[in-house]
Amino acid sequence: KSGTTKQSVIAQYLPAVVEPQSDAMAEPVFAPSNIALCKYWGKRDAELNLPVNSSLSISLAHLGTKTQLSVAEKDEVWLNGNQLAADDKFAVKVIRYIDLFRGDNSQAVKVETENNIPTAAGLASSASGFAALMLAINQFYGLNFEPQVLSAFARMGSGSASRSLYHGFVEWQMGYRDNGMDSFAMPLEHSWPDLRVGLVKVSTAEKAVDSRSGMNRTVDTAHLYQSWPLQAAADLEKLHQAIANKNFTLLGETAEQNALSMHATMIASWPPLLYWQPDSVAAMQAIWQLRASGTEVYFTMDAGPNLKLLFSAANEAAVKQQFPAMEVVCPFT
Ligand code: DP6
């Protein structure tokens, strides 16, 4: 751990005075949600939110978060059209994040944020949420941060948010520097128009242990975690190869094994962390069954019970037949 604070790192990139721009009422900004194919799991610096391993994701096109800042009398946070109480957990997080940029004694703001991620899909919104908030702050205060700086600062809000600044395949390099400014995400050039992501909901109940506490517990208590950085590095390599050669089998196998390896480290934590529900396991078995019968489909899972499926456009009908309620996303159209 470096002992460096977020504020001290951000301060080096701020102008002498941070204040709303006169034309800051522009359009709301949008950031897509993303699903990691090689997961981020574990922090090497909790204050700066620096990861133990690099990760690679695919963004979910139009599914994500729209956010807008405007001048107000008092700080206000609105989520999906409803004003949140000042002491609401989410509202406090948002205002604290804005404080990192505007300091303590400045103009109050109204934050309006909307998620269009269907709650039925059971997807987390912190990745697109912090990415959109960073973009909105950048615009509102006219900060003109470089893309890499935007990504590094979004990472300070939530690690996976570093990847939500971009569409398509995105890689977040873990970085090595103490101040973390080399720990940001960049888009990969490759596109894959036939690729589909299916969102299979098992439960939308709020999870008992959020990813932040979950990964800290894993790092602190699971001996199995020692193998995780090696798994992640090997998988990242395979994913690069799979993407460059449009090798769907390699992509799917790598993503599924990576997710299960991450979950293995969670299960080996104490107290144990098992995000799966009986229906999650039933869905996994249905997927393995589909595969055995010739439909190539793979899954990945995050810190929750829901599954994200990977398949090609040609197999969409067959997969839908097994999972009729699944929401299908085309990441490259
Ligand atoms: C399992 O980015 O939500 O989804 O940095 O603590 O906010 P914090 O964690 P977060 O963790 C995401 C974990 C994951 C894997 C991934 O998205 O890479």
Image (spheres, rainbow, N blue to C red):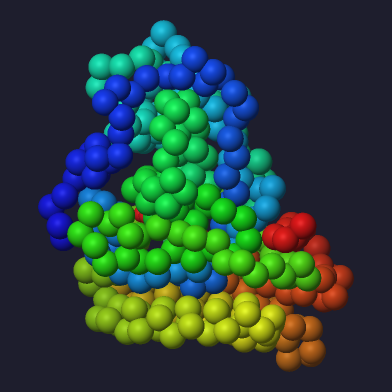
- Location of residue 8 in the rendering, given as x and y in whole percent from the top left corner: 20, 41
Nearer to me, 249 or 148: 148
- Location of residue 327 in the rendering, given as x and y in whole percent from the top left corner: 74, 57
Query: What residue is rendered at 66% in x and 84% in y?
Result: 245
Instruction: Indicate the quadrant containing the C terminus: top left, top right, bottom left or bottom right.
Output: bottom right
Question: Can residue 307 be seen from the camera position used here?
Answer: no
Above or below, 188 against 29 in this view is below
| Residue reaching furthest to the top | 73
- Location of residue 98 in the rendering, given as x and y in whole percent from the top left corner: 36, 31
Query: What residue is rendered at 61% in x and 45% in y?
Result: 64
**Left or right of 69: which side holds 280?**
right
Above or below, 119 against 220 in this view is above
Residue 283, quarter of picture: bottom right
Instruction: Indicate the quadrant containing the N terminus: top left, top right, bottom left or bottom right.
Output: bottom left
Nearer to me, 64 or 266: 64
Above or below, 208 against 316 in this view is above
Question: Can residue 234 be seen from the camera position used here?
Answer: yes
Number of disc labels? 0
Above or below, 197 against 261 in this view is above
**Left or right of 165: which side holds 18?**
left
**Left or right of 315: which side holds 214?**
left
Query: What residue is rendered at 41% in x and 78% in y?
Result: 232
Residue 116, quarter of picture: top right
Quadrant of ligand 1: it is: bottom left
Nearer to me, 115 or 143: 143
Query: What residue is rendered at 44% in x and 36% in y?
Result: 144
- Location of residue 130 in the rendering, given as x and y in whole percent from the top left corner: 46, 43
